[in-house]
Image (tube, rainbow, N blue to C red):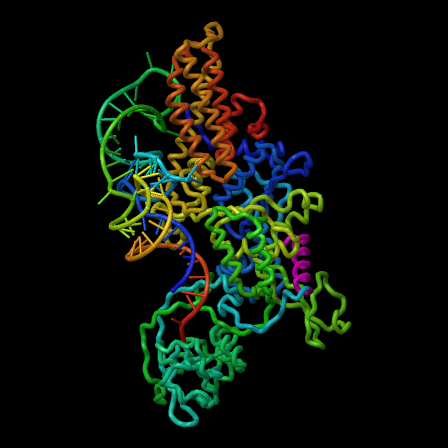
RNA sequence: GGACGCUUAGCUCAGUUGGUAGAGCGUUGCGUUUACAUCGCAAAUGUCGGGGGUUCGAGUCCCUCAGCGUCCACCA
């Protein structure tokens, strides 16, 4: 054995052996208790980041439960990540001087498919570098035909049960990227804009002054609202305001939602371009007038401003209002929050569009019941309330996306009757009128709609025997930042489709931050590449760093210093093995079977302490306190086993006391097993020095 | 505005039934003829955010104030 443990020389070899011996391959085995985890599918469009390295928790659970005698399945899959991937790909096209509009739908789809296929291998290689015990024989992709079939069936079932509907609602639309986003995907940012105070004439006499950040939408105004308690406007309620330029007459309505103190206390209502106004319009049955189109330009209802982009139209209109003396004042430093596109950063435009929506309430109620009945346990406990609040507040879910890269919605519109029907297979004739005159919805599903089905859809494609054995899955382990976007939705759709919870336990991990506790981001330049760290210090060191000395579910500050510290620990483990191995081969003629009485006392102490250690370890592991389990062994192996016991027995062992050596070896091997789920490579490598079979064939 | 969390050694953080303050990294001193210098031994630094309460006893429970963070809602 070398005096240093060199991960670079052994990790690849060890992983290959694990794979070749099929240790990660799960089988239905009725004699064993099943334990299953579905890997949160990484996006197939990039590289792994440190967040993915947190799946180490899953590997720990899988390896631990395997060594505890269970039949374990860690199912791997990758996500097509619709909008995200198409965005990445379009950036790639832009470099070539092209855009998505240069290609036919089918060709663009094919190009992205090839791009993703290539990337999948890259990511799979990275997952192996982390040492993950994934079942490679069951790899899934969200766009596999068998998966798509299930996704279609779910959509059809939801539709048939009245839980899917098509509606013309306001959506968040990025006019630059050309797609809509669900409310969860909107990134709000603080922005300074001007607040304009504009005079509207009142038909019956006088005028009413409104405050707005968006004068260009006034062509779409269909009312003015004031607070019923506002004395200033008491006499105007019920009268008629006249919109500048176009002289449209709109009612002045009293509504309590208006804040008397803000602006002038009078609000122009533009239902087609503002979410609040849309709600007001629904309440009072006001018409919707769309004046901005999906290309981000004003339409012909705006007269001479037609064809102008939003911002230049705004400037022009302000100038014209000023010329007409209708602009009362402009407050320039008005700070507010606006919804922006998380991809390109531009301000999102609320626009009316017909889309498919899921009626969430009944589904959310059932998901909540799963938590209340403890069919699903949330860990750490404090996230339980957050999840139930999320389920309480869930609003209807827009699942239509205007991107090519995704699962195309299997909805067809009858062109003669203008109604929709759903068909999981490509229909030969219209299911409404029987003719051949129909067309498929151009849109694709929101990626989360397919990933919401991931736990059951993946297992279903493996056949009913496998499904029945491994479903519901044991644990869903993921970051707490996607509780709403993913976990809640998996519970809703999972229960809908299988009438069971998709996972018995939810275990949430925290976010990784830089050494100063700052969020890691490309723009801050503080991103640490996990693969680079593995190259330098080994996968075990990185894995231990993510688990050691942290609170479950809490954020982690990661520094290279800490990784080095863990690397040192791993080297220590190696060298303890080296010490035992060296003395194992000590000259036979010098054997002393019995210990001196002083040392036999030490041996008894060691026996007792190590038994206590294991008991405590199992307790921690069973209660998902992985950090404590690792901390316990760290403390024992370094400061008790190495610093105390070995030092006490060293002289005698060198003199050939095989009883003491045997005991040390026994305790050491036991600790290797306990450590294996955390740091699989080094434990396997040292284990191999003493034992013939893999450490994965041993049991705890 | 709402929810949750955080505030403990120079730095990053542990501390789950309340009982004499901990780890990693860093700092200082000493140590190296073979397990490990990616090491060992020793040392220093804390009114555990402020204030109040419960208790024989609180970092640990309750109240309050302050600062920070995350998620959510979002005022034209």
Please name whichever residue, A391 or A247, is drawn nearer the observer in this view of the structure.
A391
Does residue A267 sit above or below A605 in this rendering? below
State the residue lying farthest toward the right. Answer: A434
- The number of numbered badges drawn on the structure is 0
Counting from the top left corner in percent of width and height, residue A637 is at 42, 27
Q: Is residue A154 magenta?
A: yes
Using the rendered view, name the quadrant where residue A80 is placed: bottom right
Counting from the top left corner in percent of width and height, residue A200 is at 40, 87
The secondary structure that dominates the magenta segment is helix
Please name whichever residue, A271 or A239, is drawn nearer the observer in this view of the structure.
A239
Counting from the top left corner in percent of width and height, residue A242 is at 44, 89
Please name whichever residue, A590 or A67, is drawn nearer the observer in this view of the structure.
A67
Instruction: Decide if residue A549 is on the left or right side of residue A488.
Output: left
| Point 50% across, 75% down: residue | A279
Q: Is residue A239 magenta?
A: no
Instruction: Decide if residue A147 is on the left or right side of residue A312.
Output: right
Answer whether residue A119 is visible to the viewer in this image: no
Answer whether residue A647 is visible to the viewer in this image: yes
State the residue lying farthest toward the bottom. Answer: A205
| Point 68% across, 38% down: residue | A28
State the residue lying farthest toward the top. Answer: A589
Does residue A273 sit above or below B60 in this rendering? below
Q: Quadrant of the C terminus of chain A?
A: top right
What's the magenta region?
A: A142-160
Instruction: Decide if residue A428 is on the left or right side of residue A106.
Output: right
Counting from the top left corner in percent of width and height, residue A650 is at 39, 15
């Amino acid at each position: 054995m070398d005096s240093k443990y060199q991960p670079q020389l052994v990790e690849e070899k060890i992983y290959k052996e694990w794979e070749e011996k099929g240790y990660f391959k799960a089988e239905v085995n009725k004699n064993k208790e099943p334990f299953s985890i579905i890997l949160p599918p990484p996006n197939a469009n990039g590289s792994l980041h440190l967040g993915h390295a947190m799946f180490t928790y899953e590997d720990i659970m899988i390896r631990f439960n395997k060594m505890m005698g269970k039949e374990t399945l860690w199912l791997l899959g990758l996500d097509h990540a619709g909008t995200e991937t198409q965005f990445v790909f379009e950036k790639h096209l832009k470099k070539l001087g092209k855009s998505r509009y240069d290609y036919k739908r089918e060709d663009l789809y094919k190009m992205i498919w090839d791009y993703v296929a290539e990337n999948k291998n890259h990511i799979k290689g990275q997952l192996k570098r982390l040492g993950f015990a994934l079942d490679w024989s069951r790899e899934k992709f969200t766009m596999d035909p068998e998966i798509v079939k299930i996704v279609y069936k779910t959509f059809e079932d939801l539709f048939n049960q009245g839980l899917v509907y098509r509606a013309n609602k306001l959506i968040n639309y990025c006019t630059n990227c050309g797609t809509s986003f669900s409310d969860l995907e909107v990134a709000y940012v603080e922005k300074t804009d001007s607040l304009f105070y504009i005079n509207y004439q009142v038909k019956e006499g006088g005028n009413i002054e409104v405050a707005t950040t968006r004068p260009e939408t006034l062509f779409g105004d269909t009312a003015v609202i004031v607070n019923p308690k506002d004395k200033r406007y008491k006499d105007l309620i019920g009268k008629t305001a006249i919109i500048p330029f176009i002289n449209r007459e709109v009612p002045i309505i009293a509504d309590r939602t208006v804040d008397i103190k803000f602006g002038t206390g009078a609000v122009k209502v533009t239902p087609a371009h503002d979410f609040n106004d849309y709600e007001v319009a629904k309440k009072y049955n006001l018409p919707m007038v769309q004046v901005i189109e999906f290309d981000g330009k004003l339409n012909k209802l705006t007269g001479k401003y037609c064809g102008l982009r939003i911002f230049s139209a705004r400037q022009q209109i302000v100038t014209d209002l000023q010329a007409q003396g209708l602009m009362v004042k402009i407050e320039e430093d008005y700070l507010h929050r606006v919804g922006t596109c998380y991809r390109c950063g531009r301000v999102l435009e609320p626009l009316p569009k017909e889309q498919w929506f899921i009626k969430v309430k009944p589904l959310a109620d059932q998901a909540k019941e799963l938590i209340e009945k403890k069919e699903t346990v949330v860990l750490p406990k404090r996230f339980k309330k957050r999840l139930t609040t999320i389920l309480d507040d869930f609003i209807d879910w827009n699942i239509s996306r205007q991107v090519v890269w995704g699962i195309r919605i299997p909805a067809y519109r009858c062109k003669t009757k203008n109604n929709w029907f759903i068909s999981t297979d490509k229909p030969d004739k219209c299911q409404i009128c029987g003719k051949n005159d129909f067309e498929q919805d151009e849109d694709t599903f929101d990626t989360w709609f397919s990933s919401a089905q991931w736990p059951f859809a993946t297992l279903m494609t493996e056949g009913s025997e496998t499904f029945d054995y491994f479903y519901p899955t044991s644990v869903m382990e993921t970051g707490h930042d996607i509780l709403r976007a993913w976990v809640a939705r998996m519970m809703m759709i999972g229960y809908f489709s299988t009438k069971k919870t998709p996972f018995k336990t939810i275990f949430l991990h925290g976010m990784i931050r830089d050494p100063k506790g700052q969020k890691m981001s490309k723009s801050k330049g503080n991103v640490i590449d996990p693969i680079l760290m593995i190259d330098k210090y080994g996968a075990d060191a990185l894995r231990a760093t993510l688990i050691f000395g942290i609170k479950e579910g809490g954020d982690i500050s990661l520094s290279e210093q800490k990784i080095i510290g863990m690397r040192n620990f791993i080297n220590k483990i190696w060298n303890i093995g080296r010490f035992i191995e060296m003395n194992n081969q000590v000259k036979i003629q010098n054997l002393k079977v019995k210990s001196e009485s002083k040392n036999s006392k030490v041996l008894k102490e060691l026996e007792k302490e190590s038994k206590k250690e294991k008991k405590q370890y199992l307790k921690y592991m069973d209660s998902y306190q992985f950090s404590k389990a690792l901390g316990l062994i760290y403390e024992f192996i370094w400061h008790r086993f190495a610093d105390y016991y070995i030092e006490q027995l060293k002289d005698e062992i060198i003199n050939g006391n095989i009883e003491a050596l045997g005991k040390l070896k026994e305790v050491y091997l036991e600790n290797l097993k306990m450590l294996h789920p955390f740091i699989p490579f080094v434990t396997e490598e040292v284990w191999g020095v003493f034992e013939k079979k893999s450490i994965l064939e041993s049991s705890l």
